[in-house]
Image (tube, rainbow, N blue to C red):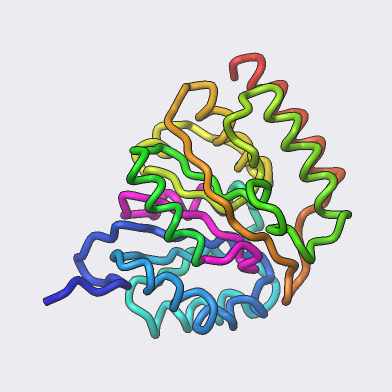
Amino acid sequence: MPLPHAVGGGLNPVLTVVLPCHNEAGNIARYDADLFPALDALGVAYEVVIVDDGSLDDTAAKAGALAAARPGVRLVRLSPNRGMGGAIRAGMSEARGEWIATLDADLTFPPAALKDMLAAGNAAKADLVSGSPYLRPGDMAGVSWIRTLPSLMINALYRGLFGMRLTAYTPVLRLYRTSFIRDLGITSNGFEINAEVAARAMMDRRVVAEVPAPLHARTAGVSKLQRGRELKRHLALILRLLSGR
């Protein structure tokens, strides 16, 4: 009997997909059409951990309905809001897969990109695979310069400080070997968590890989990123990393 893609019961998944969600009810409504078919097409057993990070809308109700209807989907509820980093860390602590993927709740990076990321991770025996919109021309078409310019600048700073092998230090779209990420001791609570993991991987000379991934504009909900606050967090993280903490 073939192993089902979405696992339940006592089966062990190959992949755990973590989705940090704060007020993302409008996007969770899209998952039946835009998320699960892409995950089914991966051809591996998977589970999905939806983390409701103190939402004030119907995120928890919609995620709970998915968890009740689909095997291998679980809901983790946090209160109060812990931020992107706190939600990702909570989801990772629940993971049972050999690999952990993190995805933006708004699916601005397409879940189908995970197919190439899994292939790259297995081929390179990587600890971290990053999806990057900077590797291929046109992969940021439709994304406003207001979002693009700060991202280019902060990624350039991390590249200069921690290694040029990665073009993208900050995106949420990632694939981690579970044994690697659980031993890393990450502490970030905001969006800077993605840069912390990538920088620590580079500093530890871990095996990293990168694949092209298109970035699209949001179609539902609003971004939770506050640029001034996140810039301060990135600068504090860089100082912490450079001081060996």
**x and y, in percent, of residue 235 in the image:** 77, 29
Q: Residue furthest front?
A: 137
Asked if residue 104 is among those painted magenta in the image, a careful observer would answer: yes
Q: Nearer the viewer, residue 143 or 233?
A: 143
In the figure, 69 relative to 117: above or below?
A: below
Q: Residue furthest top?
A: 243
Which residue occupies 48% across, 44% down?
129
Image location of residue 72, percent across then percent down: 34, 71
Q: Vertically, is 150 above or below 159? A: below
Q: Quadrant of residue 3?
A: bottom left
Query: Can you say which quadrant of the picture contains the N terminus?
Result: bottom left
- Residue that appears at 56% across and 35% down: 198
Q: Is residue 198 left or right of residue 70?
A: right
Query: Residue drawn 46% across and 81% down?
Result: 66
Judge left or right: residue 51 versus residue 171: left
What range is drawn magenta here?
A: 87-111
Percent position of residue 107, x then y? 61, 67
Which quarter of the rendering shows the C terminus? top right
Is residue 156 shown in magenta?
no
Q: Give left or right: position of 108 versus 42.
A: right
* Total marks in image: 0
Q: In the rendered image of this protein, does residue 101 appear above or below residue 195?
A: below
Q: How far across and how far down the image is residue 141, in percent?
A: 76, 62
Asked whether, in this view, residue 230 is left or right of residue 22, the answer is right
Could you tell me which residue is drawn at 78 percent across and 42 percent down? 152
Q: Quadrant of residue 229?
A: top right
